[in-house]
Each structure stands twice: as C-alpha cells, then as structure tokens.
Image (cartoon, rainbow, N blue to C red):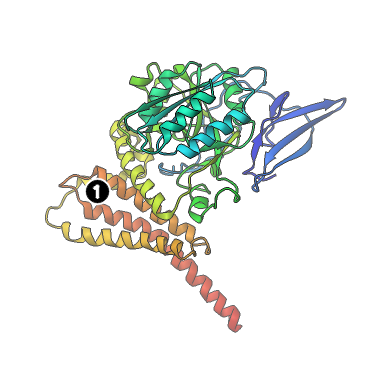
Amino acid sequence: MRGDLAGKLLGGQLIQDARVGFFAKFTTRPGLKWVQVQYLESNGKWATVTRRLLRAPKLLAQCAKPVQPKPTGTQAPTQSTPKPPRAPISITAKKRAPLSIVMPTYNRADSLAEVVRTTQRLCANYDFEWIIVDDGSTDHTATVLETLSRDNANLRFKSIRNGGPGRARNIGAAMALHHVILFIGDDILPLDKDFLRPHAELHAEHDTPSLAVLGKVVWPGSGRMAVSPVMRHIQGKGGEQFGYADFTPNTVYDWRFFYTCNVSVKRRAVGDWLKEGFSDRFPFAAFEDGELAYRLEKKLGAFRIFYAPSSCAQHLHPYTVAGFLRRQECAGAMAHTFLEMHPETLSLLGVADIQETLKSSKPGQHDAPTADYLALMEGIKAWARILEHEGLLGNEAWHDELLFAVFEMAYLQGYVTLAARAHSNHAKAYAIILQRAKIRIGRIIESELTADLRFKSALLGLG
C-alpha cells in the first residue's frame, strides 16, 4: 500500500495496526483475524483491501510524545527528521461530540456558500452548528450569509471590520455553544461523509483540552480545478504550505502543525477567546495559528495534535508563482512578529544568521550594493514567473529546486522587511539570502550540465 494514502475510518470496532498504518475495522472468525482497510488513492478514488493478521493489535488509550517531522511552510527544518512512531490513540466509535464549526471569511462569497451547503448535505447525521464571521468583505458575502442563515437553522453569522483571520476566529469561538470547536477555511470543501467523524469521535473519546485533531486538505480533482506545478510543489514533499506529504497518518505532532484550515480543539483550552485566543498582532494568515498552539503547549504542559487524514477536504485555492511569492513574503513578516513574542524559538524559524546580521551595522559601506542585491533577487523570481507564463514550469525535474529557492527567498525577504531598522546591515542580510539561493541554483546547474554531457556522450557514442 502507498505510504501517502489517507486512511478512512470505518464503522464498528476500530484499531491501529503498524503494518497497515491506518485506523481500520477488523472482524474475527475462529482461529483467524482479518483487518479491512479503506483508503484514498492518488486518483481520488476509494479502494478497499483485506489483510489477515497473525495476532490482534493492541489498543492503547494514551497520547504518545509528539514527533517532530521536517517542518514545512513557514517553519525552518530541524537538524534531523526522526521516524515518527504510531500514535497510540484509540477510537471506539461509540460517541460523537457536538461541534461548533467556526469559519472566518473574506471576499469568498461563492466558495463559502458551496462549503456550507456541501457540509450540510454530507454531514447531516452529525450534531453541529455554524458560526461564520465576515471579516469586512467587500463582495456579496453579506447577501450570501443572509440567505444561508434563512435556509439553515444551525447557522449564525456576524459581520465585523476587517482585522485578520485570527481576530475573526476569536469572535466566532466566543460565540460557540458546543464544547468542541472545529476551525475551517471558507475554501475548504469536504470530500465525503467522514469529514466530521474524526473530530466528533476523538474529542468524545478523549476529554482533555490538550488534544487537537488535525484533518487533511488536498487539491480538487482535475475536473474541478487545474492543479498547477506551483500547487503540486507547495503541498509536495518538503513543500512550503502544509506538511501533509511528510506526515504519517494517525500520529501525534507538535504545535507547529496547528493548521486552522481543518483542525478542532476543546473550547475550554482557551479561557477567554477574546482576550487569550489568536493574537491580533498577525494581520496576515501566517503564524497566528501556530502561535496560539505554542502558547497552549506552554500553558497546558502539553498540546498534542493528532493527524486524522480520514477528515479530508478539498482546498479551493489556486496559486500561481506570483501569488505564492506574496504569500511567502507575508509569512516572513509574520515570522518576525512571532519571534518578537517568543524569542526562544529563533532556531526553529531559519533566520538566526539573518537576525544576527541585521544587528551588525557598517554605516556608509552597505547602502550601494543593497539595490543590486534586490535587483538580482527579483531577477531570479522573474525566472520562475517566465517559466510559468510560457507554460514550461514543471516540465523539468530542476524546476522544484528553483521553486524552493524563490519561495525561501521571498520568505526571508519578508522577514528582513519587517525586522530591519534604519541602521541595520541590509546588504549583508540580502547577501545571505542570495547565498542560500545560490546553493540551490548551483545544484540545478550541476545537474543540468551533467545530464547534458551524458546525453551528448550517449548520442555520439562516446565514453
């Protein structure tokens, strides 16, 4: 079975088997034990396999220590990537907790309506309410919300001035009636009827505020949205947006992976959501969710995020090179805000050398090359944009390395923009950023030259 397949929860008794890697239903006959697993293939279709077990898997009821895979998105990689153990959390599927679905929205009226109606249709057997907070939209979101509230008795909404997704979530969480809050985005479309199941069942089974449940998001099928090379890259191995490609199903992770596109938490984990929830220091959608999870970990002594990919949704958010470069610049700026609040996390953000450099100033010696460094960085970004414009991006293996280079460059540039002061050594900081890009681009050149020489040798019968 493929390691990246998403296990799907089945009814009945559920177990976790290390040889399978997913929660699965098993049935027994005299002398035999069988496990049946339903999983999601890369083509979006469900498949089922049955395996014979030599012995019954052991059910464990307590959380394991969170593992630390290679962080992705806005976080920096750690020194090593230990192999994550299976998370010993059991599900008996006897109870389902009522859920308060909290969704901030901004100028996505059409996708918002589809998300609500699809969830209502697929998850009609679950007990849940909607709390939608319109964060100052300027499109027809208000009209859509009025219609949705008339059509759905379990939906409430509130319109506020634009203040960022974190503030909107706090307002929604404060309005929640149920004990479990599920945060999702206004572009997160449930894939099937199991979307709410892990959130409802795990929280019913484990009544602790230190547990969060993280679902999965994937790109829509080709019939719904064209998945561009940029989109495949940012959610691939080591991708910059989400770490799903590097996750092990049904495993516990730490605060860095509190993705509010599809994650649930006990309402009581935060005493007062308006005062102690998501920080209002993050105007952009980056680091505000991880920052809350980090504070919860310190407050509760442990905050464990259980990855349950059977809660799977489609992410209706196309990206281009230019669009994701802007996202990375915002993420870099928000990384500086996060570091101001939690300076002890410096080693995790991948900016320690740049932060130190910005503190060293050599007046009169660094102003001139700064403009040249910036021009060179823009030229490298333009390289990726041109490949995309010409329809060539993704045709060569080295394009992934180029995207890693330009997206890291944008992230670090965003950090410098917010962290630098008038006396800071901007030129040296940009030189460090370019040096990192040079290493990646050097690999591209070496790979391409080597491949070209081998091709010519084979063609001419040399060597």
Residue drawn at 44 percent across, 53 percent down:
320
- Residue 312 x/y as whole percent: 59, 36
- How many numbered circles does the render carry? 1
Mark 1 nearby-residue class (10 Å; few <14, some 14–19, many ≥20):
some
Q: Quadrant of residue 364?
A: bottom left
Q: Which residue type carries mark 1?
A: Thr
Residue drawn at 58 percent across, 38 percent down:
248
Left or right, residue 259 beside residue 198 = left
Image quadrant holding the N terminus, namely top right
- Residue 81 x/y as whole percent: 51, 42
Residue drawn at 27 percent across, 61 percent down:
375
Does residue 346 lie above or below 56 as drawn?
below
Does residue 319 lie above or below 304 as drawn?
below
- Residue 96 x/y as whole percent: 61, 19
- Frontmost residue, 122 versus 71: 122
Asked which secondary structure carries label 1, the reply is helix
Report the residue that reaches farthest toward the left: 364
Task: Give the residue pinned by disc 1.
Answer: 357
Does residue 418 lie above or below 105 as drawn?
below
**Residue 88 seen in the figure:** no
Q: Quadrant of residue 5?
A: top right
Image quadrant holding the C terminus, namely bottom right
Left or right, residue 456 beside residue 386 = right
